[in-house]
Amino acid sequence: MSGKYPPLTCVDVKRILRALGFSPRPGKGTSHEQWVKDTETGLLKVTVDCPKAPFSQTLIGSMHRQAGVSKAEFYAALDR
């Protein structure tokens, strides 16, 4: 499972989101976690559903778009 964009675990995604400046919202009793970041243009919100990990490229695509970054930037944040 190597390659330029391998599947990501829940821990990986949380590390990426923290590196990008996101913080978790308090839980609502569901498996979906909300990670938020205030920006000049408004609030960015990323939904993370850890039971779906390792995440498919479809879900990773959704998360990086919600975070407002490219897929390359999303993966690069894992190395920060």
Image (spheres, rainbow, N blue to C red):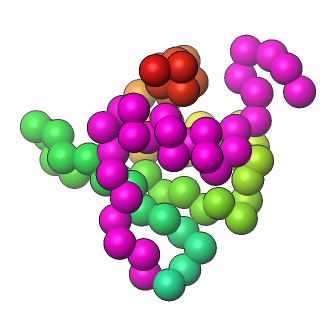
Asked whether the viewer can see residue 71, the reply is no
Residue 42: x and y, percent?
16, 47
In the image, taking residue 36 as reference, residue 40 lies left or right, namely: left
Query: Residue at 73% across / 15% down in the picture?
Result: 4
Which residue extends farthest right? Answer: 1
Query: Residue at 80% across / 16% down in the picture?
Result: 3
The residue nearer to you, when weighing 1 against 70, is: 1
Indicate the quadrant where residue 30 lies: bottom right
Which residue extends farthest left? Answer: 40
Q: Is residue 27 magenta?
A: yes
Q: Which residues are magenta?
A: 1-28
Q: Quadrant of the N terminus?
A: top right
Residue 73: x and y, percent?
47, 20
Asked whether the viewer can see residue 30, the reply is yes
Total labels drawn = 0
Above or below 38: residue 79 = above
The residue nearer to you, when weighing 56 against 77, is: 77
Residue 35: x and y, percent?
39, 55
Query: Residue at 71% across / 23% down in the picture?
Result: 5
In the image, taking residue 2 as reference, residue 33 lies left or right, namely: left
